[in-house]
Image: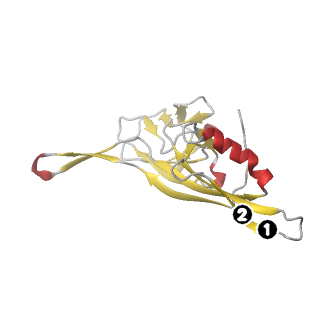
Amino acid sequence: MLTVIASPTHVIPLRSEAPTLKDELAGGALSLRRRWTRVLKRWELAFPGRAEQLDQLGGLLDFAQGDTPIFFDGAGMIEVTEPILIGIADGTTTDFNLPHRNVYVATTVVYINGAPTNLWAPLGGDGILMDKIRFSIVMGGMAQLKAKYRRKAKVVVETEQSWQLDRVLRNQTNNGKSIYQLRVMLSEVPN
């Protein structure tokens, strides 16, 4: 497994993609349904450094070039630090999809109506990562289910907006060494 460690100066979440299927019903009404189970994200990253420092990252981007998924830890931008809604109990359902994939089991804290609980087990992963949870009890009364966690995103390098290396600073007094900035767009892909 290849790991590249880099520190971006910024990570900008550009958009979320959550397409909907629309079917016309009688009388002009629409039936709307999710096309995907989860929302997919897209990010722009910028990395500063000397050209030789950015070579490893550039090599990974050349290797991936739009069709080879790589994992992105989000540089702190994709963690769910405040509990978010993951479901509403209906009295029969025990399995709930998490809004994101590749969630670290060890970092997950689940809440029922605002109180932390351990009445759940990970599903859909290898025990280290998961993408859904199963409650050991059936909850009724429209209980709110929330969670916070860390995750990683499976992404591809966007080829429509190719990555680029720009010179941002040239120091004439330091043997002409330059500082560059590598900019890249990443799009999350379904597993």
Name the image quarter holding residue 170: bottom right
Label 1 neighbourhood size at 10 Å, few (<14), some (14-19), many (20+)?
few
| Amino acid identity at mark 1 | Arg
* Image point (79%, 52%), residue name: 53
Whole-percent x, y for residue 34 in the image: 34, 44
Specify whether 52 is left or right of 47. right
Kind of residue sitting beneath label 2: Arg
Q: Marks 2 and 1: CB-CB under 8 Å?
A: yes
Q: Which percent across, then down, holds residue 20?
A: 32, 47
- Is residue 24 rendered to the left or right of residue 84? left
SS class, disc 1? strand
User: Is residue 125 visible from the viewing direction of this image?
Assistant: yes
Residue 74 image position (x, y, % from top left) = 62, 50
Q: Which residue is mark 2?
A: 167
Residue 142 on image: x %, y %: 36, 47
- Which type of secondary structure does the marked residue at label 2 adopt? strand
Q: Which mark is residue 170?
A: 1
Task: Pick whichever, 164 or 22, lies toward us.
Answer: 164
Give me the C-alpha separation between circle 2 and circle 1.
7 Å
Identify the residue shown where x is 72% and y is 55%: 7
